Image: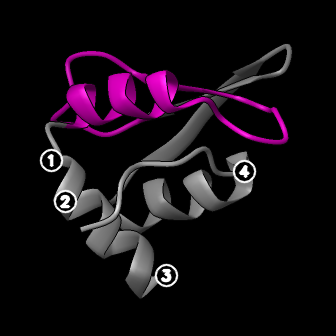
Amino acid sequence: MSHIAPISWKKFEKFLFYIGCKLSRQKGDHLIYSRPDLKRPVVVPKENEIPVFVIRNNLRILNIASGEYLEILKQI
C-alpha cells in the first residue's frame, strides 16, 4: 500500500468533486468546499503542491480513511 503524498490543488479539487463537494466560495488563495453532511468546510490552499498535513486534516473532516482516499485517486 502506498502512502499519502503531496498533490496539486487541481487534483485534490477533482477528488472533492468526485465525492460530492461543491465550491462554495474563495477567500484570497484559499478555496472553500462544502457538502450538506459536513459540519465544517474543507479548505484547500491554491499551492503547487498541497502538504500532506493539509490533506490528512481535510480527510478527517470528510470522514474518509487514507486507504479509501488513495483508491479514489487511482480512479480519477
Residue 61 screen position, x and y as percent: 25, 26
Tag 2 residue: 67
Residue 64 screen position, x and y as percent: 17, 46
Tag 3 secondary structure: loop
Tag 4 residue: 8
Q: Residue at x 23, y 68 (%)?
A: 1
Which of marks 4 and 2 precedes in the sequence?
4
25 sits to left or right of 65: right
Q: Is residue 66 above or below residue 45?
A: below
Q: Which residues are magenta?
A: 34-62
Separation of disc 4 and disc 1 at Cα?
20 Å
Separation of disc 2 and disc 4 at Cα?
19 Å
Tag 2 secondary structure: helix
Which of marks 4 and 3 precedes in the sequence?
4
Identify residue type, mark 3.
Ile
Separation of disc 3 and disc 4 at Cα?
14 Å
| Residue 76: assigned label | 3
Tag 1 residue: 65
Residue 76 screen position, x and y as percent: 49, 81
Identify residue type, mark 1.
Ala
CB atoms of marks 2 and 1 within 8 Å: yes
Q: Quadrant of residue 48?
A: top right
Separation of disc 2 and disc 1 at Cα?
5 Å
